[in-house]
């Protein structure tokens, strides 16, 4: 609240005059921070053709771009902080997750329709895999104070999208590619 008072130049009473509760203040702050972060994630997405490349671009934006709001991912932070303590904020975070998952799933669905993504790929599951991998990597990167986990997650997801998700490769060729990457044991 002190940060908000400093940023706005208002006293507590002046802030609360515009909001019915501190939960409402928190919800508005989350909405603003999430929209800023989301816009960075989708930046330049319209200029990318091909569904797998669009997914890779979204992943790259997550790893490489930061929103103007400091402190990391508002979704991750809010999900951890609100949990059961603030149901309004928890619901906003849940809606934000749904928006992000929906965007990824729509790109995947389009890719399946266009024949760019294998027909057996479940869009909701793949979207959640991408989100959980990136958010987990972000948490580790913040704890370790380096970008190693984010870089590794991006690299892994890029390979996974190319080898397991992109259409045009048979299961046999994917298995052969995976076996050739494993270290050979004598």
Image (cartoon, grey):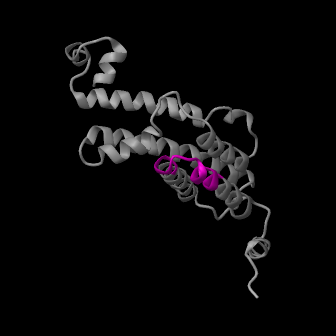
Identify the residue at image location x=26%, y=17%. Answer: 15
Farthest residue, direction bottom = 186
Q: Which residues are magenta?
A: 141-154
Identify the residue at image location x=56%, y=31%. Answer: 39
21 left or right of 52? Answer: left
Determine the image quadrant of residue 3.
top left
| Magenta portion: prevailing SS class | helix
Up-down: is 62 above or below 11?
below
Up-down: is 11 above or below 153?
above
Q: Quadrant of the N terminus?
A: top left
Q: Quadrant of the C terminus?
A: bottom right
109 left or right of 11? Answer: right
Q: Position of residue 152 (x, y in %)?
A: 63, 55
Q: Position of residue 59 (x, y in %)?
A: 63, 46
Q: Position of residue 42 (x, y in %)?
A: 61, 35
Farthest residue, direction front = 145
């Amino acid at each position: 609240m002190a940060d908000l008072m400093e940023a706005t130049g208002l006293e507590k009473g002046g802030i609360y005059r515009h909001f019915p509760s501190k939960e409402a203040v928190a919800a508005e702050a989350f909405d603003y921070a999430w929209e800023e972060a989301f816009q960075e994630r989708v930046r330049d997405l319209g200029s990318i053709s091909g569904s797998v490349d669009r997914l890779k671009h979204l992943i790259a934006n997550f790893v490489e771009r930061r929103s103007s709001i400091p402190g990391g991912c508002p979704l991750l932070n809010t999900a951890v902080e609100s949990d059961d303590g603030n149901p309004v904020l928890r619901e906003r975070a849940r809606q934000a997750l749904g928006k992000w998952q929906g965007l990824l799933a729509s790109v995947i669905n389009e890719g399946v329709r266009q024949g760019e993504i294998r027909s057996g790929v479940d869009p909701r599951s793949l979207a959640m895999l991408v989100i959980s991998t990136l958010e987990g990597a972000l948490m580790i990167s913040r704890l370790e104070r380096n970008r190693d986990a984010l870089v590794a997650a991006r690299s892994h997801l890029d390979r996974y999208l190319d080898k397991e998700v992109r259409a045009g490769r048979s299961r046999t060729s994917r298995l052969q590619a995976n076996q050739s990457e494993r270290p050979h044991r004598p």
